[in-house]
Amino acid sequence: MAKGHDHDHHEHHHHDHSKEIHPHQLQPPHEVFHDPKAGEIARAWITNGHLSLSLHAMAFGKADIWGHVLAGMAAQVAGAMAEMGHGNTAGNLEEIRKTLNEGLAKAAAQNSVLANKS
């Protein structure tokens, strides 16, 4: 499994933490225990104020499938927030879409700057 970007770029130790449980770790969805073919594709954490990922980037073999995964995550977040009393699903989803589009545009711009330097 590929390690995601650690935006801090300091302290990269690679000892095994697979048997440890972090106190803020989420439990896997209950459905995965009933599907022998289930596989984890991503873990996302905020650490030191930055996004840190552990992910299986080639889980689907194509980048476009990740768009479906991210859209599904956005829809679930929007719905869960509404259930917890924060706005409504449509409004939450629109806020996520706006910020996501801005973030993707920024990432594309940074990537094109990096590509032009090489």
Image (cartoon, rainbow, N blue to C red):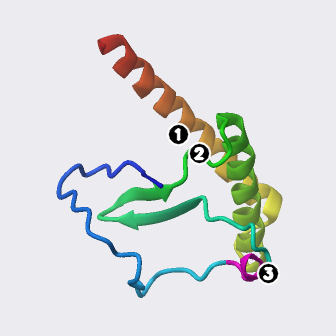
Whether residue 66 is in magenta: the answer is no
Other residues around mark 3 within 10 Å, as few (<14) / some (14–19) / many (≥20): few
Judged left or right of residue 42, residue 60 is right
Of tags 3 and 1, the one toward the viewer is: 3
Tell me which residue sits at (66%, 65%) in the image.
39
Quadrant of the rendered image containing residue 100: top right
Q: Please state the extent of the stretch shown in magenta in the rendering.
A: 29-34
- Residue 9 is situated, as x and y percent measured from the top left of the image, at 23, 49
Task: Identify the residue at image location x=69%, y=65%.
Answer: 77
Instruction: Report the residue marked by disc 2.
Output: 99
Crowding at label 1, few (<14), some or many (≥20) Cα neighbours within 10 Å?
few
Quadrant position of residue 23: bottom left
Tell me which numbered mark, 3 or 1, is placed earlier along the sequence.
3
Asked which secondary structure carries label 1, the reply is helix
Q: Which residue is mark 3?
A: 34
* 35 up-or-down from 89: above or below: below
Q: Nearer the viewer, mark 2 or mark 3?
A: 3
Q: Do tag 2 and tag 3 residues touch (Cβ < 8 Å)?
A: no
- Seen in the picture, residue 60 relative to 43 is either above or below; the reply is above
Left or right of 31, for residue 52: left
- Mark 2 residue type: Thr
Would you say the magenta stretch is mainly helix, strand or loop?
Answer: helix
Q: Which residue is mark 1?
A: 103
Inspect the image, locate mark 3, and give the three-letter code of the amino acid beneath it.
Answer: His
The Cα–Cα distance between marks 2 and 3, rounded to whole angstroms, is 35 Å
Whichever of labels 2 and 3 marks the residue nearer the N terminus, that label is 3
Residue type at numbered disc 1:
Gly
Q: Residue furthest left?
A: 11
